[in-house]
Amino acid sequence: MSEPAAPSIFEPAFSPAAERNREPIAAVLRARLPAQGRALEVSSGTGQHVAWFAAALPGWHWQPTDWQDSGFASIAAWVARAGVANVAPPRRLDVTAHAWFPDQDPPPWFDLVYNANMLHIAPWACCAGLMAGAARHLAPGGRLITYGPYLEDDMPTSEGNRAFDASLRAENPAWGLRRREDVAAEAARAGLVLAERHAMPANNLLLVWQRVIEKS
């Protein structure tokens, strides 16, 4: 009688960039966020970020999402490896949809909406969708944090980012590094304003957005 086959071990997807930048981003989150809160991650990708941040911020509850469910097994695997219990199962989310949580009434509120490395590999409509959706779901005092490479009118663009932008546009004309000023204009249409700008390794930026504070 032959021996039973050994059970297969699922290997989650791996992003070298996410591995490199997870701790620099976590350091900013730890310094800027309160001890507890609810976070929505838009476009969770491999799941490396949400697993790492859940361990780094144990008082926070995280909801990972992505626009398709093909990566959900990877997200779940990274969460399992991290051994954390403060991450909900991943769910589908289309940032361009008017209702992000059509099955929930009332819709959920979050103290943090987090999105990394999506804007430059998605159509421009996704930027408007992200800003509008975040504005709808941010709790009072909540913040939207975006991370990735940007172009800036008042800052020189590194050669690496120039080459990266050209390669993205060659692959898909709808892609490319976004001007921070254009992103800010979309944010303003949704009632959000840039509150903090953090220079990060490898010519990336971490941007903190919050609701416009109306003067009484």
Image: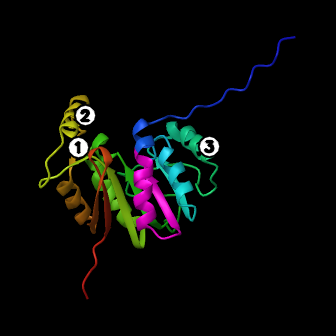
Give the residue at mark 1.
177
Give neighbour class at mark 3: few <14, some 14-19, many 20+ (Cα, 10 Å): few
- Measured along the vertical axis of the image, is residue 154 above or below residue 69? below
- Magenta stretch containing residue 80, yes or no? no
Near mark 1 (Cα within 10 A), the count class, few <14, some 14-19 or many ≥20, is many
Magenta range is: 21-43
Where is residue 59, by image quadrant?
bottom right
Q: Are marks 2 and 1 in contact (CB under 8 Å)?
A: yes
Of 4 and 107, nearer the camera is 4
Give 95 or 98, whichever is nearer the viewer.
95
Q: Is residue 94 visible?
A: yes
| Inter-mark Cα distance, 3 to 2 | 32 Å
Q: Is residue 23 magenta?
A: yes
Image quarter where the N terminus lies is: top right
At label 2, the amino acid type is Leu
Q: Position of residue 104 (x, y in %)?
A: 53, 62
Residue at the spot 44% in from the left edge and 36% down from the top edge: 15
Relative to 23, does residue 19 appear above or below in the rendering? above
Amino acid under label 1? Leu
Distance CA(mark 2)–CA(mark 1): 8 Å
Q: Foreground mark, 3 or 1?
A: 3
Amino acid on which the number 3 mark rests in the picture: Arg
Residue hosting label 2? 168
Image position of 153 (left or right of 136): left
**Percent coordinates x, y for residue 95 in the rendering:** 38, 51
Estimate how packed mark 2 is, as few (under 14), some (14 to 19) or many (20 or more) residues with alpha carbons within 10 Å: some
